Amino acid sequence: MKISKFEIVGLFGRYNYCISLESSYLILTGPNGYGKTTILKILNAFSKSDLFFFYYLSFQSIKLWLTDGCSLYVTSKNLIAESEVQDTPNDGDREIEFKWINADHTECRFVINNRFIQKAIRSIGYYEGRRLGTDNISSKDFLDFTKRNPRMLQIIAREQTNGNAFLLQIKSFEAVFIEAQRIFKPKATKHINFGENEYATLTLNYTIDEIAEQIKNIIHKAKYDFLSFSQEKDNQFINKLLNDTFSHLSQQEYEEKRNSLNEKSRELSSFDLIDNVVIPEYSDDHKNELAAYIQDISEKFEKLEDICGKLKLFSDIIERKEFVAKKVSFSVEKGIRVQTEDLKWISLSDLSSGEQNIIIMLYYLVFEFGRNKLLLIDEPEISLHVAWQFQYIDDLERILNLTEGQAIIATHSPQIIGERWDKCFDLTSQCK
């Protein structure tokens, strides 16, 4: 699901934007304070079902048109509450209305206002066996609390006719947000308090070592799935041979497939996905066995095609960056490894900030960004050498081609933009 156009009215009480996406990516430009990062956060909030984000955002309306014919409208208004409607009269109560309209024009609606929030807080206090304070709704801690407690939205949805249907529809809008702050310190834990009760903890920050651990897990899972599939194919091999259920090959066809698969085997083993397999040369005496065997190998390798393509793209882009006197490789034990010119292994934390930034960003771009999703990138130029900035959009286009995705990039860098001014939307062109 991709965006064709979106419109924001009254952002921060002063800016109106109507932005069309006519290709696989769009570059947002403009001075600080015009809302580049906020636009990315708006789209990310939709994708994470972080609907309380809009309760605290200053805007009048947001409209989102999708390429599948669906649309999403959000409006904000202040209510003059009446005592028979509110549990307690509350002048200045704010209401955020969400409306999802399907391609067939059917729609579902979801509303957040002070009355629903108060009821949800009381309900959660009951379910958790403790009372939550209701006087901190305007605080950042409360917003953090809503992010970690989807039950808030679920309770509010029960109060509305189409509430649950809306929450289900909004999940179909998927995005990955790469924020400007990407090189993190070691993990810390913040304790969130509501009233007198310590309610929960929020984990903060990440390390590049965790990115390596994630890649390690990805390689390990791919290798395990490959071995399981291989065992299944091996168990069926004798029946395939006896029942003649394989494609017969001429010597030329066999040699062409053999050369291609030997090359693929070397590539797969370079990423530690398999031990290198050397396919035997053609023999007329064993042509049937060899034809069945080479077909099996081809089917096994296909199981690794997706992960191999991602690792190869990851590796190619890093190699293109030419890390100073260092070579990056992959393994099932370490995930990512870095070796110096004198063949010494070094810690990932010893890489420069720019090198760490490249690895972290690439991980999200290649492995977290699934097919047909929206990619949101804030200030990709941070910690990137100027030469790397010139390469950035070329690398991004390769990733978007692999994933059939869409990207919106907010940047100040003319090097990132290069000659692609036709792909830019300058926020100053429509501000009022």
Image: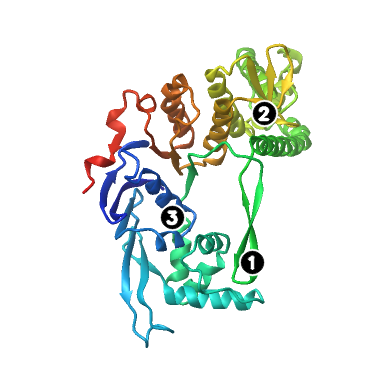
- Looking at marks 3 and 2 on the same chain, the residue that comes earlier in the sequence is marked by 3
Mark closer to the observer (3, 2): 2
Q: Which residue is mark 1?
A: 199
* Residue type (three-letter) at the residue carrying disc 3: Phe
Badge 2 element: helix
Q: Which residue is mark 2?
A: 348
- Vertical relation: 189 (above or below) 256: below
Mark 2 surroundings within 10 Å by alpha-carbon count, few (fewer than 14), some (14 through 19), many (20 or more): many
Badge 1 element: strand
Corner quadrant of residue 97 = bottom left
- Label 1, label 2: how many angstroms apart (C-alpha)? 36 Å
* Residue type (three-letter) at the residue carrying disc 1: Tyr
Counting from the top left corner in percent of width and height, residue 326 is at: 64, 17
- Label 3, label 2: how many angstroms apart (C-alpha)? 34 Å
- Looking at marks 1 and 3 on the same chain, the residue that comes earlier in the sequence is marked by 3
**Rendered residue at 38%/29% (across/down):** 413
* Residue type (three-letter) at the residue carrying disc 2: Leu
**Rendered residue at 52%/42% (across/down):** 370
- Looking at marks 1 and 2 on the same chain, the residue that comes earlier in the sequence is marked by 1
Corner quadrant of residue 430 = top left
**Rendered residue at 25%/51% (across/down):** 16
**Rendered residue at 40%/83% (across/down):** 86
Counting from the top left corner in percent of width and height, residue 113 is at: 41, 72
Q: Which residue is mark 3?
A: 46
Mark 1 surroundings within 10 Å by alpha-carbon count, few (fewer than 14), some (14 through 19), many (20 or more): some
Mark closer to the observer (1, 2): 1
Front residue of this view, candidates 254 and 100: 100
Side of 77 relative to 342 (left or right) = left
The numbered mark at residue 364 is none
Counting from the top left corner in percent of width and height, residue 309 is at: 57, 29
Side of 385 relative to 409 (left or right) = right
Counting from the top left corner in percent of width and height, residue 69 is at: 33, 53
